[in-house]
Image (cartoon, grey):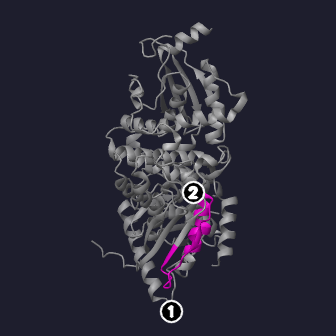
Amino acid sequence: MSNLNAPNSPFVPFSPNPSIQSGVPTATPPLSASKPAQLGSSNLRYASSRKSIYDRHLNRTQRSELSKASFAFLFGEMIQYAQKQVSGIQDLEKKLNIQGYAIGQRLLELLLYREGRSAKRETRVLGILQFIAQTLYRHLFGKPADGLEKSREHEDEYMLIDHDPVVNSHISVPKEMSQLNCAAFVAGIIEAVLDGSLFPCRVTAHSVFSEQFPSKTVFLIKFEESVLEREAVLQ
Amino acid sequence: MSSTKAARIGEEVWKTRIDKVNAELVTLTYGSIVAQLCKDFEGDYMEVNKQLDKMGYNIGLRLIEDFLAKTNTGRCANFRETAETISKIGFKVFLNITPTVTNWTSDNKQFSLIFDENPLADFVELPDDGRAQNELWYSNILCGVLRGALEMVQMQVDAHFASDVLRGNDTTEMRVTLIRMIDDELPPGDD
Amino acid sequence: MVILSILILNKAGGLIYQRDFNEGLNKLSSNDYLVLAGTFHGVHAITSRISPVPGSGGLEVLESDQFRVQCFQTLTGTKFLIFAEPHQPNIDVICRRVYELYADYVMKNPFYQIEMPIRCEQFDRQLVAYIKPKQ
């Protein structure tokens, strides 16, 4: 078995490690010895009704709904909080990306679990992108993505198109920050799903003005070399 | 306004006038916010509580306009009516829950909200580091929201959690106290 | 139904939004609009106090033979002024809808600072899209 961390290895350690996003994958630190390894030795208290989160069915809230306003206000605060910590549009987008990343990691596991027996492990670029454009998008936003394109100039670039991202629907970016696209949050979700499915990449959100769709956003997905190599082998 | 009337209004507004999204998007987004705060404050959960309250306050200042615009609610006659409005209409149209109003003090200035369900905390388990369960109020943002929203309609309140199932308690209970009514002040003179 | 213009005032009576929807209106300077807003705010406060009926709200409608202005004040103190042609029915409906748009595209915009002038592109767009078809 090849060394998992060898350079040019097609495998990237899957870890909740934002350092991966800086382009330098580092190994997941081993679990520290002080962490309780078995479930029985947890020190957490549970309500006396004995109902913990492990008793609830994972699919219970699958179709539950909350108000879009709740999301808008929470997302707005997330943006304001991030804005106080950084001093540039790129850094702000990076912060939003990281917060979306954490969500994407969880969502991937959840969605695959829910597919049950028919869950398929995607090994081809088109397959995983379709999963994102259809399954993931439908689950989060109630509609599929509006388009999927492959770049003509760059082999390693793909574009996911959303005519009107739900996350941006209440936001008007001030003119002096017109470069900012808060859907960087969604870019983070997409990036985490791709990384977690072993398609390492970088995803960024770009506003593309169009008369018909003033809020149109294009997610630019740039895959790492290893993905293209594998794709060529599987061809 | 009676409790049943408030419940009916809440239900109707929720059904007909509220745009909805997948609940898990909201739950996961809130989780990401709390996790980020815990990371930024390096496990100082008291700071995290404060920050959540502050964020909630900022939200409350804005949320009240959305609430008034969508529900057309008029001024409440007294604090008891306010409590029913918050529980049956407010929480209903934003989080689709109706926490129970109870434990009134005899002066009618303090009550509790008991949450049977809390969508913000679905599938959440606090870190097993020996401190989180004693220090962190996971849903503290809700206290700030109430404080900010009510301040905009001239009520100064204090809201804090007294118990939380995430901490191993049997119930999740928020205590709300009316500190004072904020009187209308004359507009500042021209300068 | 002809809407002439819309003004929004914050709690302190400061003008935070002004937009004309009709070509033939007199254009005031931005300072004039600020004075107009502040004056209205003061008049509104006075009318609520001099009203012979106790517990009265402030000025709601002002009608002349040239125009009608309706003031909708929210429980939070924000005022929406709708200027329309005289004898227009259903301004209430318009007030409510403008309030909703304000809640959706101004309040929910994290880049909008409370009590400050409104510069939210989506709010403009949605407002124009709502009012223009009615003209």
Q: Residue at x 63, y 35 (%)?
A: A111
Dot 1: element: loop
Q: Does C49 sit above or below residue C95?
A: below
Q: Is residue A233 visible?
A: yes
Which residue lies at the image location 64% right of the left edge and 66% below the top edge? C93
- Decide which of C35, A9 is in the foreground and name it: A9
Report the chain holding disc 1: C
Could you tell me which quadrant the C terminus of chain A lies in?
Answer: top right
Q: Are marks 2 and 1 on the same chain?
A: no
State the residue position of label 1. Answer: C52
Disc 2: which residue: B118
Outermost residue to the front: A40
**Amino acid, disc 1:** Pro
For mark 2, name the chain: B
**What stretch of residues is rendered in magenta?**
B83-111
Residue at 38% of width from left, 65% of height from top?
A: C34
Residue type at mark 2? Asn
